[in-house]
Amino acid sequence: QLRVTPDDLRTMKADGQRIVALTAYDRPTAEVCEAAGVDVVLVGDSLGNVLLGYETTIPVTMEEMLHHVKAVARSVRRALVVADMPFLSYQADLTEALRNAGRFLKEGGAQAVKLEGGDRSAETVERLVTAGIPVMGHLGYTPQSAHVFGRNVVQGRDFDAAMTLVNEALALEEAGCFAIVLECVPREVARALSERLTIPTIGIGAGNGCDGQILVFHDAVGWGPGAALKFVKPYANVGDVLRQAVSDYAREVREGTFPTAAHAFSMPAEALVLFEQ
Ligand code: KIV
Ligand code: NA
């Protein structure tokens, strides 16, 4: 089976075919995505809050990202694997950005990277693309700037802010991004933007006018607090299923009803005779 490429995503947009994206962080989540035919698997720095217990994505390191990028890259063949560049791995200078992005392809086995920001990141995008690294952009609410945004989650709500978003998206397209994530922007702005761009937009909290959609894996399957966010639809209640399973296990172990003989090994009769003497 052929690997999805950045070019394929542009073709899908041109053909009006929606792009399905989801995060994955390890083999079990990546295999579920692959089995469902997800087109783009993002190893998001959301692993900071979703898996590693941080409050934000800000503490996530290159090493933590690489650890998970490798696991996902080893587990999927068809989906395009995009590695999220963690905070401060690409903002300080172009050379450092290139070396870090390169590690995700060279050591991690990803086929592309994602980074946050429009104008502030355009030069970096250009540098990476020139070096042969496909880059996905990320505009609107960018979680690595959580302390700047404060409680203002939805971005581009008034005319000026919307126009800024449009210009930043055009700058990212010009810089060479193959797609742009739009996070928490009004659906009207996301739709207009998607019409203006030739590269696909991947929405999260951006309505249905985008060229594709992404969610955090755990939110999408109803595992953890993200399932309750306004822009999330939980397609299962995996958290409930897991809590029930683990409490049943704990009860049966305490009662002595698990394991039974069916879950155990036994000695052959001849050996048992000797053993029991
Ligand atoms: O880190 C992440 O999971 C993301 C997506 C939600 C776009 O950046
Ligand atoms: Na992210």
Image (cartoon, helix red, strand yellow):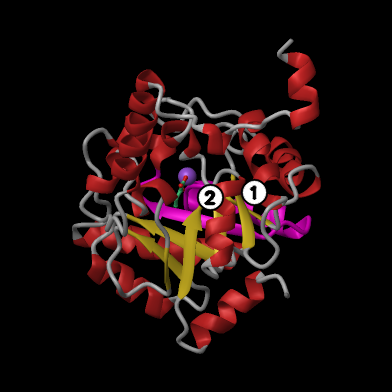
Which residue is painted at 66% across and 32% down in the image? Answer: 265
The N terminus: image quadrant: bottom right
Q: Amino acid at mark 1?
A: Val
Mark 1, mark 2: which one is toward the viewer? 2
Q: Residue furthest top?
A: 277
Note whether 16 is above or below 38 in the view shown. Answer: below
User: What whole-number distance in Å separates the C-alpha atoms at marks 1 and 2?
Assistant: 8 Å
The C terminus: image quadrant: top right
Q: Nearer the viewer, residue 227 or 161?
A: 227
Q: Are marks 1 and 2 in contact (CB under 8 Å)?
A: yes
Q: Nearer the viewer, residue 214 or 267?
A: 267
Note whether 167 is above or below 142 in the view shown. Answer: below
From the top left corner, tell me how far across and down residue 78 is, in percent: 67, 68
Which residue is painted at 63% across and 39% down in the image? Answer: 68
Which residue is denoted by mark 2 in the rendering?
29
Which residue is painted at 74% across and 23% down in the image? Answer: 272
Which residue is denoted by mark 1 in the rendering?
72
From the top left corner, tell me how far across and down residue 45 is, in percent: 51, 40
For the residue carrying disc 1, how many other residues have a C-alpha within 10 Å: few (<14), some (14-19), or many (20+)? Answer: many
Q: Is residue 133 magenta?
A: yes
